[in-house]
Amino acid sequence: MKLLVINGPNLNLLGVREPGIYGTLDYNGMIELVRTECAEAGIETDFYQSNHEGDLVDVIQDARGKFDGIVINPGAYTHTSIAILDALKAVALPAAEVHISDVTKREPFRQISYAGMACCVHVIGQGVAGYGMAARQLAEKIQKGQVC
Ligand code: DQA
């Protein structure tokens, strides 16, 4: 089982960026945490982060045939990017949406998730632990053939 964990804009600044909302663990620390948690569950992970929408579309397209599924936190592109939604639908890989913060309790402009419309797992507001939770839930669905 091999999953690609994709992070969008500003998530490279984890630990520095609004720590009251996103926590104090930095991006590399998050990778180590998620990699370890996933490895314990028999899930291999690769990680990709970009601040650019087109790069995120490219990496989603490239995942086809290389990964069993995608875990994605598109950052602010969650709420704006039909291109990322379309890319997820185009590759038709099982996908899980992660948000570190509880976007459901934040500003009105964060209440729509385009990427989430292509995801069959949603882990929201669980901090960085949400990545590992999403990966395990997605892997379980894939293993049971309950893919979206
Ligand atoms: C986020 C929530 C988004 O609204 C925000 O733009 C982010 C991070 C989260 O993980 O909570 O960049 O996706």
Image: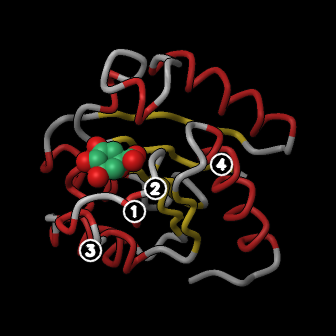
Specify the amino acid type for callout 1. Lys
Q: On the image, numbered disc 3 is attached to which residue?
A: 112
Amino acid, disc 3? Ile
Q: Which residue is mark 2?
A: 102
Which disc is residue 2 wearing?
Answer: 4
Residue 76 position in % (x across, y down): 22, 51
Picture residue at 43% right of the left edge, 33% below the top: 22
Residue 60 quadrant: bottom left
Left-right relation of 1 to 59: right
Q: Amino acid at mark 4?
A: Lys
Q: Secondary structure at mark 1?
A: helix
Question: Marks 4 and 1, how far apart in space?
Answer: 32 Å
Taking the spot 39% from the left edge, 72% from the top edge, the residue there is 116
Check disc 1 and report the residue beneath it. Answer: 105
The answer to whether the residue bearing label 2 lies less than 8 angstroms from the nearest atom of ligand 1 is: yes
Kindly tell me whether residue 5 is visible in this rendering: yes
